[in-house]
Image (tube, rainbow, N blue to C red):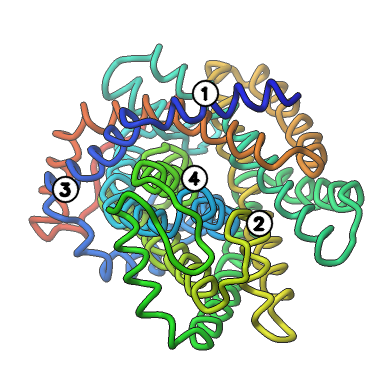
Amino acid sequence: MNSAALLIEKVSSAVWGWPMIILLLGTHLFMTIRLRFPQWWVGKAIRLSVSKDKHSHGDVSQFGALATALAATIGTGNIVGVATAVALGGPGAVFWCWITGVFGMATKYSEGLLAVKYRAKTADGRMLGGPMFALERGLHAKWLAIIFAIFTAIAAFGIGNTVQANSISMLLNQTYGLSPYLVGGVLAGLVLLVIVFGVKGISKVCSTLVPFMAFFYVLGCLVILGMNWSCLGESIRLICRSAFTTRAAGGGFIGSTVLMACRFGIARGLFSNESGLGSAPIVAAAAQTRNPVRQALVSSTGTFWDTVVVCALTGLVLVSSIVAHPEIDSTQGAALTKAAFDKLPYVGDLILSVGIVTFAFSTILGWSYYGERAVEYLTGHNHKAGKIAIAAYRFIWIVLVFAGSVLSLSLVWNLSDIANALMAIPNLIAILLLSGVIVNETRKYLWNNRLDEDSNEEPPIV
């Protein structure tokens, strides 16, 4: 097991080397410039996310699709993931994680646009979409679409399942002494109760859960930052300086290279906001929207809330807590998060527990939908074969929710990083090669102020 873990760690380091970092950040920057900084439209995008296109085609509302995507993205990556990045890459990792979020909004916008532009409809009226449809219909590269779907189905077991279950069980075991087997059994049962209702059931639960969990966690972070107020300026300077200097020193931090800060910051940023990963477009395609650009704007707010707000707050809480309390061990991600929230009297453990449990549970729900749609695509939309495959996938999903509760955290994180990269590559290819389509749609609806206009394109039936 140790040899396998070391091998996986080496593969993860190789996959997340400079080529992947350049491809990911390069796509973010390229789309930001080509789309004339779509980040400036975040205010309008937020307003659109809470409005309804009742007479538009789709399975769920724009907010329902966003809530499901946020449920899948706001997970342990925002808490344990950021802490792991700080532990392995130093405080500078927070800067690169945040940068990934800011520029990643353009990539998330692009993904959402392509998802609606190239979505299809089943015979029973359900909307299907995502990078596999953009690759097949937009680039006529079905072989690449199949590769993406395979990676998605596999990656879901890591980023969306075992990692989340593992974080829940570890926290509840360390904080309240609960058996991982008990936690895994209860968690598996709750997930099963929701996913049997499909995207509408998942969307309904997530629409209720996401606003509550985000508000509760953000409030706790703000209180801790208030307690660390005297160290906040020094913490921000340390984060920015450590992102570009050879070593990060100060407080209880260990030294780390710029490459380590960059690698772990970007990797955890992608793990958290999933911009460029190609997951969120799968549910964006199910949204009730008048045209592709409206949903693209709504989709981009997912990265804004997830990374630009929540991950940034988590990073500031962790770094400021270490600066204020140098005795905190900054070398262990999960322990670092717990130590930071322990400084909040009486309710610190409760806020962290509720945050991780609700974040991780909602992520499991959102990713179960992504995995099922990937499996459905791989069956060639054969109704009978699809039903059998999805039933089998759900069974394996529930089993792994339980199994994930007792796996090694480092092994799970490294496996997830590898799967993320393999899933992101075909999606980024689609975005880059279809960037002209993205620009044309943006010009038609956004730059020409025609956001309220209905698209006259009918999704083909598959």
4 vs 1, front mark: 1
Callout 2 amino acid: Ala
292 versus 421 height, above or below: below
Give me the residue at 76% from left, 48% from top: 191
Any mark on residue 271, and which? 4
Return the x and y of residue 283 as percentages of the image width and height. 48, 44
Among the two numbered marks 4 and 2 on one chain, the one whose residue lies closer to the N terminus? 4
Any mark on residue 334, and which? 2
- Tags 4 and 2 touching, CB below 8 Å: no
Callout 3 amino acid: Thr
Q: Real-space Cα distance between discs 1 and 2?
A: 23 Å
Among the two numbered marks 1 and 2 on one chain, the one whose residue lies closer to the N terminus? 1
206 versus 18 height, above or below: below
Mark 4: secondary structure: helix
Mark 2: secondary structure: helix
Q: Which residue is mark 1?
A: 11
